[in-house]
Amino acid sequence: MVRYFEYSDEAVAHLKTKDAKLARAIDAVGRVQREMEEGDLFSSVVHHIVGQQISTAAQRTVWARMQGALGDITPKTVCDATLEELQACGITFKKAGYIKGFAEKVASGEFDLAAVERMDDAEAIAALSSLPGIGEWTAEMLLLFCLGRPDILSFGDLAIHRGMRMVYHHKKVTRAMFERYRRRYSPYGSVASLYLWAISHMDVPGYDRDFAPKAKSPR
């Protein structure tokens, strides 16, 4: 069964009250239905490692092969597989090592996923991004699309930057500007993210221009 990120009318009303420009964008977009990730936090971490630097279609193919080979993606099934068996699903030796090492840490109790789920956002991001193969952006996406955390706004997400430039007519979104928006959107940063991503697609009526300076053509 497909899950969608759940957000309330209260969250939308809060964002519209706090920010008139974002309010217009929200009205232009309408209700957003963004799919959540399937499975638990363990399988989501593995899924993200699989998907790094490959297309969505390729990720889907590799994931289907892994599920065919291992069944459920759990610490035990991954630990029981050899690096060669993981590679045979279509991933690199480095990714296979990341996935295998992660599974071993979880199985041994060295890395406590249940504890991560109880941490606040900053602690959970730090814990997840300490894993080989998981960076800060990936950790933030795990919090948003696996755990459904309500206040995730990623500075490392290029589409979020593009959405902000389009909504606010900025040529560039600096870290200081971004943090001001983060404070303004809180505690519903995740909902703001959904709308900024929607705007960044450049197919919403009235939002078809990215105000970033165009790159100069080489002479």
Image (cartoon, helix red, strand yellow):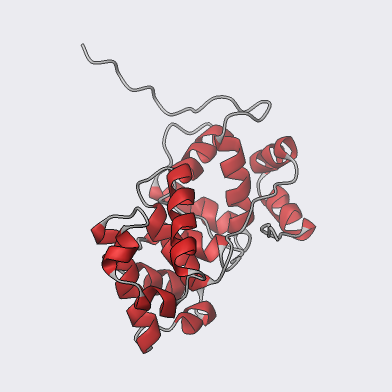
Q: Quadrant of residue 96?
A: bottom left
Relative to 69, is 145 on the left or the right?
Answer: right
Relative to 105, is 150 on the left or the right?
Answer: right
Q: Image point 54% across, 33% down: which residue?
A: 166
Q: Image point 67% across, 51% down: which residue?
A: 18
Q: Is residue 12 visible?
A: yes
The relative height of residue 102 versus residue 47 in the rendered view (above or below) is below
Q: Image point 68% across, 42% down: which residue?
A: 20
Q: Is residue 130 visible?
A: no
Q: Quadrant of the C terminus?
A: top left
Q: Quadrant of the N terminus?
A: bottom right
The relative height of residue 160 versus residue 1 in the rendered view (above or below) is above
Q: Which of the two residues, 31 or 77, is positioned nearer the viewer here?
A: 77
Question: Residue 29, percent across and down?
Answer: 70, 38
Question: Residue 44, percent across and down?
Answer: 49, 65
The relative height of residue 21 versus residue 188 in the rendered view (above or below) is above
Q: Residue furthest top?
A: 219
Relative to 73, is 31 on the left or the right?
Answer: right
The relative height of residue 5 versus residue 202 in the rendered view (above or below) is below
Q: Which of the two residues, 187 or 219, is positioned nearer the viewer here?
A: 219
Q: Residue furthest left?
A: 219
Q: Quadrant of residue 37?
A: bottom right
Q: Quadrant of residue 75?
A: bottom left
Question: Residue 186, percent across and down?
Answer: 60, 61
Count all numbered tags in the image, as a single digit. 0
Q: Residue furthest bottom?
A: 109
Question: Residue 47, percent across and down?
Answer: 45, 60
